């Protein structure tokens, strides 16, 4: 069972497309778009448009990147980013996490490997291939049960307008890329609202 939140949503779709027989079901929570906009050289472009057509190599199962392999200049930048991230690791709303989870998050953000793991030179290629493959199928996820949910802040004066905006975005982005993915749940997108409090 896969559960993906934010960028984890597209990653779960990529995993399910690569290993469909290993996935029993999928839940996408506030999932990011499969093909979001990115600023590249001062221009706003779709992520998949940054793909160059380079072949995606097989997944490495041995000889992983070691911290000692990271060039000194790059490591210095990573360590600087870690020093900036740690003091704010559990700023609100993460201050409501259990103490053990907060300690784990503080530790993770202090590790060089946490940042090095984000670097994937073939990311755009992988998602461009996934998007192209999805366009060929009416139900890209086949019979994998799937469900998606979105969350938004509730503001009395803006509730109706926000609901309409979410509905438009859902039809434009989620229906084609996420909600239509499986034959067993062709349209399973729920929108939940979280109360927002203001200090007087």
Image (cartoon, grey):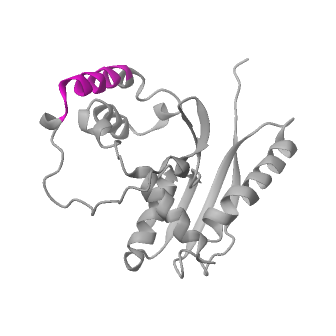
Residue 62 seen in this snapshot: yes
Specify whether 50 is left or right of 175.
left
> Which residue is drawn at the image coordinates 56% and 55% (left, top)?
34
Number of marks in the rendered image: 0
Q: Position of residue 25 (x, y in %)?
A: 48, 73
Residue 4 seen in this snapshot: no
Q: Nearer the viewer, residue 27 or 177?
A: 177
> Which residue is drawn at the image coordinates 80% and 43% (left, top)?
162
For the N terminus, the image quarter is bottom left
Q: Position of residue 35 (x, y in %)?
A: 57, 52
Specify whether 22 is left or right of 152.
left
Query: With respect to residue 146, does 99 lie above or below?
Result: above
Q: Can residue 182 be found in the magenta stretch?
A: no
Q: Position of residue 98 (x, y in %)?
A: 40, 39
For the C terminus, the image quarter is top right
Q: Nearer the viewer, residue 24 or 199?
A: 24
Specify whether 1 is left or right of 69.
right
Type of secondary structure dominating the magenta stretch: helix
> Which residue is drawn at the image coordinates 35% and 42% (left, top)?
118
Q: Can residue 80 be found in the magenta stretch?
A: yes
Q: Nearer the viewer, residue 150 or 20?
A: 20
Magenta region: which residues? 70-84
Residue furthest front in the image: 53
> Which residue is drawn at the image coordinates 56% and 70% (left, top)?
134
């Amino acid at each position: 069972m896969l559960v993906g939140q934010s960028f984890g949503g597209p990653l779960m779709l990529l995993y399910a497309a690569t290993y469909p027989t290993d996935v029993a079901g999928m839940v996408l929570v506030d999932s990011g778009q499969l093909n979001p906009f990115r600023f590249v050289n001062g221009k706003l472009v779709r992520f998949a448009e940054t793909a160059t057509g380079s072949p995606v190599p097989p997944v490495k199962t041995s000889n992983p990147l070691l911290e000692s392999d990271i060039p000194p200049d790059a490591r210095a930048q990573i360590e600087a980013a870690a020093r900036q991230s740690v003091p704010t690791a559990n700023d609100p709303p993460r201050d409501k996490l259990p103490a053990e989870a907060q300690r784990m998050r503080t530790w993770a953000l202090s590790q060089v490997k946490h940042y090095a793991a984000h670097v994937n030179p073939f990311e755009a290629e992988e998602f461009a291939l996934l998007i192209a493959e999805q366009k060929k199928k009416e139900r890209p996820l086949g019979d994998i049960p799937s469900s998606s949910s979105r969350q938004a802040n509730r503001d009395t004066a803006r509730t109706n307008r926000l609901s309409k905006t979410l509905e438009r975005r859902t039809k434009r982005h989620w229906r084609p890329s996420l909600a239509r993915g499986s034959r067993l749940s062709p349209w399973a997108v729920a929108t939940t609202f979280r109360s927002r409090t203001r200090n007087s």
